[in-house]
C-alpha cells in the first residue's frame, strides 16, 4: 500500500496547484469537521488505476469511525416535501406547514438566514409552472439547477461550481427532453424581470452540462428522526422520485467510487448534512468506497442499474465472484 500512497500523494499535490477545488477537498473549506477531531479528516483525493479520481485513507481508520461530515454545495427538497421539511437543511418539521403555497418553512432562524444565498433571488419569481412541469414529468434534478442558478445570480456561487465533477454520458434523446425544462427555467427568470446580463450564464449548453453532472453525483436524502438512514441515490428510475425528502450535491462525497461491498457508508440523521463512517478497518493508502445502490440486490440487478444509471460495468471483487 505504501507505494500507492506515495504515488497518490504526489499526484494530489500536483493537481492541487492546478485546481483550487481539489484544495477544498483536502482542506475541507466547505466541510464540517467534528470538534473532537484534532486534525483534518484522514482522507485525501488521488487517482485510481481504473476509476479516475478516488478518496484514499491517509492513515489507518478503525471500524465505526466517523471519517468526516459534509455540507451540500446545493440541495433542494422534493416537491412533495416542500411544506413538511426545512427549505434549507431538509430537516423534517414536527408539524406540516399550513401557510400559503408561496411560502416555504424553515426549521430555525439560522436556516432562514443561511438560505438568503438563494432565497432572496428565488422568491422574486413565480415557480408554479416550473414546479408543475417537474411534478408531472417526475423530475427532480432541475430543482437543483434552479437553486444553483439562484445562487449564481445572487453572487453566492459561480457557473463553474460543478465543473470538477464527473459528468454522465447523455444520449441525444435525453438532451432533447431537457430543452422544455431549460426553456421553462429561463422563461421564469425572464418573466420575473431578471436582465440578460444577470442570466447570461443560463444557456442551454450550461444547463445540459450541469444536469450531466447532477445525474451521477446527486444523493437521494431520506430522513427519519432519531434513526440512521444509509440510502444513496440510484440514477435508475427504480425508486419513486417523490419518495425522498430531497436531493443534494456534495463536493468530497462525490469523489468516492462505488463498490458493491463498500468499506464506508454515508448517512443522514436529521438534516441534509452527511456523515461518512467506516464499515470496517481501513488501512493507510486503501481506497474508500461507498455503494451507489441497494447492495442487497443480486448480481444481475446491480449490474443493470449501475450500467443504465451510472454508465459503468462494476468489476468489484463481489461482482467478479458473481455474488
Image (cartoon, rainbow, N blue to C red):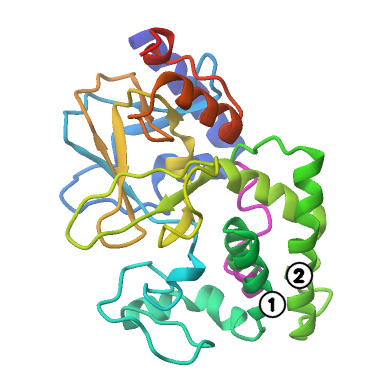
Q: In this figure, which residue is indicated by the disc labeled 1?
A: 129
Up the image or down, 54 lies above or below 202; here it is above
Q: Is residue 229 above or below residue 197?
A: above
Query: Mark on residue 187?
Result: none
Dot 1 alpha-carbon crowd within 10 angstroms: few under 14, some 14 to 19, many 20 or more: few
The kind of secondary structure element at disc 1 is: helix
**Residue 170 coordinates in the image, percent (x, y):** 73, 39
Q: How many callouts does the rendering have?
A: 2
Residue 263, position as x, y percentages in the image: 29, 26
The residue located at (54%, 79%) in the rendering is 119
Query: Disc 2, disc 1: CB below 8 Å?
Result: yes
How far separated are the C-alphas under marks 2 and 1?
8 Å
- Please tell me which residue is depicted at 44% across the width and 56% down the height of the picture: 72
Please give the name of the residue rendered at 16% of the width and 28% of the height, measured from the top-left corner: 62
Going 63% across and 66% down the picture, which residue do you hit? 136
Q: Earlier in the sequence, mark 2 or mark 1?
A: 1
- Magenta: predominant secondary structure element? loop
Q: Residue 207 in the image: state x and y as whole percent.
A: 73, 55
Position of the N terminus by quadrant: top left
Looking at this view, is 61 or 214 the one in front?
A: 214
Quarter where residue 237 is shown? top right
Residue 160 lies in the magenta stretch = yes
Q: Is residue 212 above or below residue 197?
A: above
Instruction: Give, as a single range, the part of the protein colored magenta.
Output: 150-164
278 to the left or right of 32: left
Note whether 87 is above or below 161 in the view shown. Answer: below
Amino acid at each position: 500500500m505504501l507505494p500507492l500512497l506515495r504515488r497518490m500523494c504526489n499526484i494530489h499535490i500536483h493537481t492541487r496547484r492546478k485546481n483550487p477545488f481539489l484544495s477544498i477537498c483536502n482542506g475541507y473549506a466547505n466541510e464540517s469537521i467534528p470538534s473532537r477531531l484534532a486534525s483534518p479528516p484522514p482522507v485525501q483525493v488521488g487517482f485510481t488505476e481504473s476509476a479516475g479520481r478516488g478518496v484514499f485513507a491517509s492513515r489507518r481508520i478503525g471500524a465505526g469511525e466517523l471519517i468526516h461530515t459534509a455540507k451540500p454545495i446545493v440541495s433542494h427538497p422534493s416537491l412533495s416535501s416542500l411544506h413538511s421539511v426545512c427549505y434549507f437543511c431538509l430537516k423534517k418539521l414536527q408539524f406540516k406547514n399550513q401557510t400559503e403555497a408561496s411560502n416555504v418553512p424553515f426549521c430555525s432562524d439560522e436556516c432562514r438566514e443561511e438560505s438568503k444565498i438563494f432565497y432572496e433571488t428565488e422568491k422574486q419569481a413565480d415557480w408554479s409552472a416550473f414546479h408543475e412541469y417537474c411534478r408531472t414529468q417526475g423530475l427532480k434534478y432541475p430543482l437543483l439547477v434552479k437553486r444553483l442558478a439562484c445562487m449564481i445570480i445572487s453572487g453566492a456561487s459561480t457557473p463553474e461550481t460543478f465543473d470538477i465533477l464527473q459528468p454522465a454520458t447523455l444520449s441525444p434523446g435525453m438532451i432533447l427532453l431537457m430543452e422544455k425544462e431549460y426553456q421553462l427555467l429561463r422563461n421564469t427568470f425572464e418573466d420575473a424581470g431578471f436582465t440578460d446580463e444577470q442570466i447570461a450564464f443560463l444557456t442551454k449548453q450550461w444547463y445540459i452540462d450541469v444536469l450531466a453532472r447532477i445525474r451521477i453525483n446527486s444523493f437521494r436524502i431520506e430522513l427519519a428522526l432519531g434513526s440512521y438512514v444509509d440510502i444513496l441515490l440510484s440514477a435508475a428510475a427504480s425508486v419513486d422520485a417523490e419518495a425522498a425528502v430531497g436531493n443534494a450535491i456534495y463536493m468530497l462525497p462525490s469523489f468516492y467510487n462505488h463498490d458493491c461491498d463498500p468499506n464506508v457508508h454515508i448517512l443522514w440523521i436529521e438534516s441534509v448534512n452527511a456523515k461518512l463512517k467506516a464499515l470496517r478497518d481501513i488501512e493507510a493508502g486503501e481506497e474508500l468506497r461507498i455503494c451507489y445502490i441497494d447492495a442487497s440486490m443480486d448480481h444481475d440487478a446491480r449490474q443493470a442499474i449501475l450500467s443504465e444509471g451510472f454508465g459503468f460495468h462494476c468489476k468489484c471483487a463481489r461482482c467478479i465472484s458473481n455474488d
